[in-house]
Image: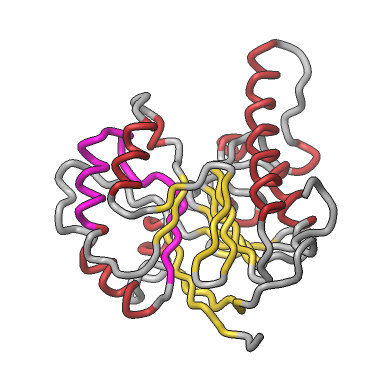
Amino acid sequence: MAETVVRVAAIADLHCTRTSQGAFQPLFARIQESADILLIGGDLTDYGMPEEARVLGRELGALRIPVAAVMGNHDVESGKADEVRGILVDAGMVVLDGDACELHGIGVAGVKGFGGGFGKRALGPWGEEPIKTFVRSAVEETLKLESALARLRTMGRVVIMHYAPVRDTCDGEPFEIYPFLGSSRLEEPINRYAASVVFHGHAHSGRPEGKTSAGVPVYNVALPLLQRLFPDQPPFRIVEIPAQPVTSGAAGRGGVQ
């Protein structure tokens, strides 16, 4: 099968509010001109309210390309995440939570992710029960990502999440909040399943580019970050990914299939 290239646009941290009607239409119009699919890395809404999701759903009506997204911490703030998800799904968005989908021949694995820190200084499950619960949440998100990646049977495998899987794209944030920006536990399945690229948000004052220990490119596509660093450019990232199915059973390097 001949290889084709799919233009993937990625952005995160839209923080859509009740008063955002019309605010995102010019942005989405630029994305539609530039890309074949759009991925959004969480914080779709500002307080996780259904009214905000309805505004974003109407804004998405201008798009004629597939859209997939994950939830962020803001989207669960008000305890109405299921309702927010339902509204956005009804508007045509694919909302991933440990799930995978295929868009134009590109495999997309999505998960919110969680905190815990990076490398040797990552928080471990020892001591008080609240600490163990915190770490368990990060482990559960990692297992969900592994499960999603294991389902993919495409050559191009894109990971979309809200929290960062590496420290590189958090550099620039206050050192004190690093444990709440992401978790290096998320990096392991990304490397093992040889993801093509990772997109995340959340770190508004971080860096736009990094990579995993295995060399997988990681892009911080938080809207406030891109607006600040590249004021003369549209605030989204475009990456071209080869789209070509691979043989069954060759989706990853180990793990549960």
**Towards the viewer: 180 or 148:** 148
- Whether residue 221 sits left or right of residue 150 in the image: it is left
**Towards the viewer: 237 or 227:** 237
Question: Start and end of the magenta stretch?
Answer: 37-59
> Does residue 93 show up magenta in the picture?
no
- Whether residue 43 sits left or right of residue 180 in the image: it is left
Pinpoint residue 30: horizontal percent, then vertical percent.
Answer: 29, 74
Q: Residue at x 20, y 53 (%)?
A: 58
Q: Quadrant of residue 160?
A: bottom right
Judged from this view, the residue extending furthest toward the right is: 254
Pinpoint residue 43: horizontal percent, then vertical percent.
Answer: 39, 44
**Towards the viewer: 2 or 218:** 2
Pinpoint residue 166: horizontal percent, then vertical percent.
Answer: 67, 51
Pinpoint residue 47: horizontal percent, then vertical percent.
Answer: 31, 34
256 above or below 82?
A: below
Q: Residue at x 59, y 43 (%)?
A: 98
Q: Residue at x 37, y 53 (%)?
A: 93
Q: Residue at x 67, y 38 (%)?
A: 117
- Whether residue 93 sits left or right of residue 21 in the image: it is right
Judged from this view, the residue extending furthest toward the bottom is: 2
Q: Quadrant of the N terminus?
A: bottom right
